[in-house]
Image (spheres, helix red, strand yellow):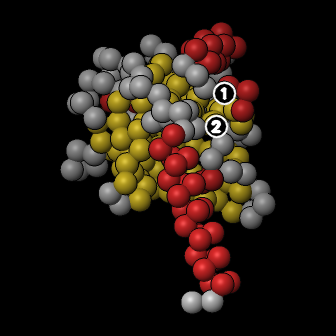
Amino acid sequence: MNIDKKKSLLLLAAVALGTVAYNALKPVISRPDVVDPFDLDKYLGKWFEIARLDFRWERGLSQVSAEYSKNKNGTIRVNNQGYSEEKEQWKQSIGRAKFVNGPHEGALKVSFFGPFYNGYNIVKITPDYKYALIFGDNLDYMWILGRDTAIPEKIRNEFLTYALQCGYETGNLVWTKH
């Protein structure tokens, strides 16, 4: 094996090891308190993304929404979509969600890629089910959702204060354009 090939393999191994180490050591929140009791029937339907911590799938998207409906097998169908102004087209991702401990709690796991699931924890919701604060499994994922595209300042501040207390970088939120 020549020297350049060895260097390439070592570099590739170092990158792979670094990626594994980052994912193993990045901040993970302990299981957050979730909405309990939770009413799935009130939660179903269309939600607009008001804010998010940006990540690869949603980067550059506006007009982001999620629609939740029941599947016949007891899971929840998740239809996420948003508009890419750069590509001048809609982007859509269909997934499914399952309850972690049963439908009385807002702790779910969501999959868009086969058997791989991520946490979807509904940690705050207004009594009328108009606004919700969602945490992922770690501090990289957070969403503020609403039944319409704007949120009252009082609820916004309550959600942001709670997220900040839980360790989220709320200054990094992307406020979705609609």
Q: Give the residue type at disc 2.
A: Leu
Q: Residue at x 58, y 62 (%)?
A: 14
Horizontal side, residue 74 vs residue 54: left or right: left
Q: Residue at x 57, y 43 (%)?
A: 65
- The relative height of residue 103 versus residue 164 in the rendered view (above or below) is below
Q: CA distance from mark 2 to mark 1?
A: 8 Å
In this rendering, does residue 147 appear at all? no
Horizontal side, residue 35 vs residue 87: left or right: left
Quadrant position of residue 4 = bottom right
- The relative height of residue 21 versus residue 128 in the rendered view (above or below) is below
Quadrant position of residue 162 = top right
Report crowding for label 1: few under 14, some 14 to 19, many 20 or more residues within 10 A (C-alpha): some
Q: Residue at x 47, y 50 (%)?
A: 79
**Residue 152: % across, % down:** 66, 16
**Residue 89: % across, % down:** 69, 63
Which quadrant is home to the C terminus?
top right
Which badge, 2 or 1, is on the more N-terminal residue? 2
Contact? badges 2 and 1 (CB < 8 Å) = yes
In this rendering, does residue 142 appear at all? yes
Residue on which disc 1 sits: 169
Q: Is disc 1 placed on a helix, strand or loop?
A: loop
Residue on which disc 2 sits: 53
- In the image as oriented, which residue stretches furthest toward the right? 86
Q: Give the residue type at disc 1.
A: Glu
Which quadrant is home to the N terminus?
bottom right
